[in-house]
Image: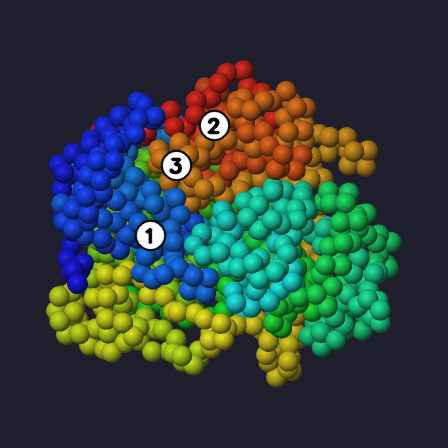
Amino acid sequence: MSDTSKTQKFDRRAFLKSALATATAASVLGADSSLSKTSGAAQQTKQDEKDTEHSSQWISAACWHNCGGRCVNKVLVKDGVVIRQKTDDTHADSPDYPQQRGCLRGRSQRKQVFSVDRLKYPMKRKHYGPGGGDKNLRGQDEWERISWDEALDLIANELKRVKKEYGNRSILLSAGWNSQIVEMSRALGLFGGYTEYWNTNSFGSWAMTPGVVGFLQLGVWDQTINDRFDMRNCDTIIMLSMNPARSAMGSASWHYLQAKKAGAKFICIDPIYNDTCALLDARWLPVRPSTDTALLLGVAHSLITMDDPINHPLIDWEFLNKCTIGFDEDHMPQGEDVKNNFKDYVLGTYDGKPKTAEWASEICGIEPSEIRHLALELGKNNKVAFLCGMASARTKNADNLPQLIMTIGAMTGHMGKSGHMTGSTMHATSGNGGPALVKAGNDGLPAIANPIDDTINANEVWNAIIDGKYNFTGSGSFVSPKQYAKGQIRDIDIRVIYSAAGANLQTSDGMSKGIEAHRKVDLVVAHGQFLTTNAKYADIVLPVITEWEKFGGFLGGNLVHSGNREMIINYSQITQPLFEAKSDQWIAIELGKRLGIDPKEIYPFDEKQQYFNALSTIEVVKDDGKTYEPLVTITPEDIAELGVKGSPQTGRISYKEFKEKGVYQVKRFQGDNYGYIAYKDFREDPAGNPLNTPSGKLEICSFTLANKINQMGYSKISPIPTYINVKDGYVDTFADWDKKIKGEFKYQLISPHYLRRSHSVFDNVKWLQEAWRNPVFISSKDAKENGISENDSVLITSAYGKVLRNAVVTERLMPGVIALPHGAWVDIDEKTGIDMGGADNILAGQYPTGQGVSGFNSVIVKIEKYHSKLADDINKPARVIFS
């Protein structure tokens, strides 16, 4: 067994030589693709490959991006150079025990890590000086190489000045969805604190609503569906705003395909006939973006009016009466007006507006007959999985949507039984509910609190910087128990934007306002591996290492974003840090020293000890499916080799084997003890297994939800799911809705996930740019009406910005809807103000609603053929600084 625990040395000369050889080979093949090798040459090539593998080493590498997967990635290293990649081959692939296979993005990882446009040295803007210098040049200034000492001194001096003059509230730590989980939060927390940034992330209104109304299991909103084996027991699987083939990498689509092979039929409700629809041969119901609430209210009306309890039962009245509250006047919360029940709202008993299929159709675009047919498909006696992704909840005014999905599932009784399930399912856990069978360990680092409670929502953060005011709704991220409090307007004077991780300027609503905000403050710092949008608009950029340059780590072992429930990945260091790149922990420590902080307070022990602590605390489920034991056997020799403190232990797999394989996966089979039926205990005995709601039941009427959201001060909702016109939604495409006269921005725009990127990551990889052009997708009908043909350059304009893209004309998109893939790096032409890069959030507005949901899929635009041709991204030069 080879020893993969030794650090691999990176030979830059060998790497450059290898890269040159690869480029030469590519140019030869490109010169005449009709040339073929002789059989002798082919045999020699195979022999060369065998010789290469014999003299090289396969090492488990990280594939750490937020793509929805968490897959096995291995690299072949020869003389310190990565020459090949592969994915999981640790066991034979099968439906019950699938390999953890990587996608095209993970397989192109070496083209990212060793890319020519890696940031190599610390640098600052040419016209930057203390206080900001010429701030308007952010995003277009020249760069100057500086030393690490100069960079850290400049940052530390400015942080100390700003703290003295304006206080710690003036420092905004911008770092993805949660400012407190990044390395710089430790140094800045000890420095006196910082203002945080928060948003509802990918989850939209699933961030808070499910936990209030009882629509979550295992403490997580996407665990209300059964496990992958039970999905094969379904007759019908309905997918609302889901495309796991694109947005849930790894095994998710494989699980759905097994259900298809077991006999399930699929119905996809989406504006796009997406890859998942095609894979599963699904019946497609095209729906307008942001209109899912109207659609489901029409379904509810159809269920109520078509239900015949004797001859054709559609509604599970026993489940409704026993397990829910608020459906009808006989089951309202005590002391509440019985007129506020859901059934009478749907029937229009008191407002005179029945939410019929015809009413819903006018808004959502699905024919009334199809809405009624969907209600029949959902009938209680059918084995149905009613599933949804998160896209439909990433819109303005969508706070009741999860509650409404829960209501439809409760009406039809698709909860708590085999072959019946309702809920959201997304990312790495898509199609496979249940507790983690492998639990991640803990690095043992003590938490460092943030003394400042200011936390600004993503939908007003840029306006807050520009205007000096914001609505404080509590401290911490969207999962913080202190968030979603009563709103209060606060003054704020942000002087420093410290982008320590993530891509918040790129991935937050209102990017145009974000650029304006970045050009207002005194200092912008960005950590980065490339000249991303965060780095492009910074004053000082600090080059950081990738996961391939770190000592090692783990992926998986947690639900939601970390991995599927059945595996955990152990990745190793592939190369020494490239050029002058440093780790985020090193930066936090060195900057902390200059701020007068003891390094041992920031990090009391090093990254190797953190790795060991996490390794030694990983747990795996026992055969009984209930209890857990240590996963890894650790010997005294392992501890000595790692150079850490710890105790030996006995586990399921040796450390050496775990490190070499790079993955541990629990082997599943039909009839094992790891199956999962969500809500099973609750359904069987709701009184003995109450939910975490005031009533202990599923709350179709939730005054707690309404009060919680309404007190925040952004917009108001009702205790029951009701239709609310969505800001920048379908109705807003009309100048006069009643007369059906279209306005200036008559198209809805959505921003689907795209296989070229993981959110914004990988957008600079030329392999992926060549394979995935990042066009704007336009329906054939809309293209014809606007005189647009395939590959024409199209100007897309909203009230907030302009984007230029080349067109793909398709029949797979609902007319009236434009699709611009999410995550392209912004590239604004300062003369015209047009973004030439295709950044979707340039077109989005900056305004919060409800619980602070980001409205990525509630955008309205106009389109027109552009007068000049946009170059394809593959033909644009890489953003190389200091080659």
Q: Residue at x 62, y 50 (%)?
A: 282
- In this view of the protein, can residue 247 be seen by the observer? yes
Secondary structure beneath label 1 = loop
- The amino acid on which the numbered mark 2 sits, given as a three-letter code, is Asp
User: In the image, is 830 to the left or to the right of 607?
Assistant: right
Residue corresponding to mark 1: 87
Query: What crowding class fits label 2: few (fewer than 14 Cα within 10 Å), some (14-19), or many (20 or more)?
Result: many
Q: How is the image coloured?
A: rainbow
Binning the other alpha carbons within 10 Å of mark 1 as few (below 14), some (14 to 19) or many (20 upward) gives: some
**Residue 669 vs residue 506, the one in the foreground:** 669
* Disc 1 and disc 2 in contact, CB within 8 angstroms: no
Residue carrying label 2: 835
In the image, which disc is placed on residue 768? 3
In the rendered image, residue 107, in percent from the top left (x then y), is placed at 34, 45
Q: CA distance from mark 1 to mark 3?
A: 18 Å
Front residue of 735/312: it is 312
Residue situated in front as seen by the camera: 771 or 816: 771
User: Residue 336: image x %, image y %?
Assistant: 76, 70
User: Tag 3, which secondary structure?
Assistant: helix
Q: Give how far apart the Cα atoms at labels 1 and 2 are.
A: 36 Å
Which amino acid type corresponds to the residue marked 3 in the rendered image? Leu
The image position of residue 71, as x and y in percent, is 37, 55
Q: At x 38% / y 57%, what residue is drawn?
A: 100
